Image (spheres, rainbow, N blue to C red):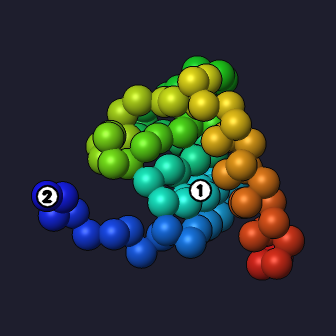
Amino acid sequence: MDNRKKSPHQGGWCWQREGSWAARMGDWKLLSNPGIQGETFAPADSLFLVNLANDPGEKVNLAAQYPERVRELEAYFENWKKRNP
């Protein structure tokens, strides 16, 4: 039996601040310009995709493995940004 609660972000969620942004739908989260306490990421990691159900610490970038999910979340963010200038 799975005792995990459903995410309140099943329908989607976005934020933007100082050049960085994130889009989340269900267990998937796409971040732009990621950085953690001064760590830097390679240019290929300028978009960082994570499956929070499998990687709640957001350590592994799945963007190269799931390009269709990246495109979906990028489009979701762009639509959100148009509605929230």
Q: Judge whether residue 37 can be spotted in this image.
A: no
The residue type indicated by label 2 comes to: Met
Residue at (49%, 68%) from the top-left corner? 10
Residue at (32%, 40%) from the top-left corner? 55
Label 1, residues with CA under 10 Å away: few <14, some 14-19, many ≥20: many
- Please identify the quadrant where the C terminus is shown: bottom right
Give the residue pinned by disc 2. Answer: 1
| Horizontal and vertical percent position of residue 65 | 57, 24
Q: Secondary structure at mark 1?
A: strand
Residue 6 position by quadrant = bottom left
Q: Is residue 54 left or right of residue 12?
A: left
Which-is-in-front pick, marks 1 and 2?
2
| Horizontal and vertical percent position of residue 26 | 48, 60
- Please identify the quadrant where the N terminus is shown: bottom left
Residue found at the very far bottom of the displayed protein? 84
Classify 34 as above or below 4.
above
Classify 63 as above or below 80.
above
- The answer to which of 4 and 40 lies nearer the viewer is 4
The residue type indicated by label 1 comes to: Ala
Q: Judge whether residue 58 can be spotted in this image.
A: yes
Label 2, residues with CA under 10 Å away: few <14, some 14-19, many ≥20: few
Q: Is residue 62 left or right of residue 85?
A: left
Residue at (26%, 69%) from the top-left corner? 5
Q: Secondary structure at mark 2?
A: loop
- Residue 22: assigned label: 1
| Horizontal and vertical percent position of residue 54 | 32, 40
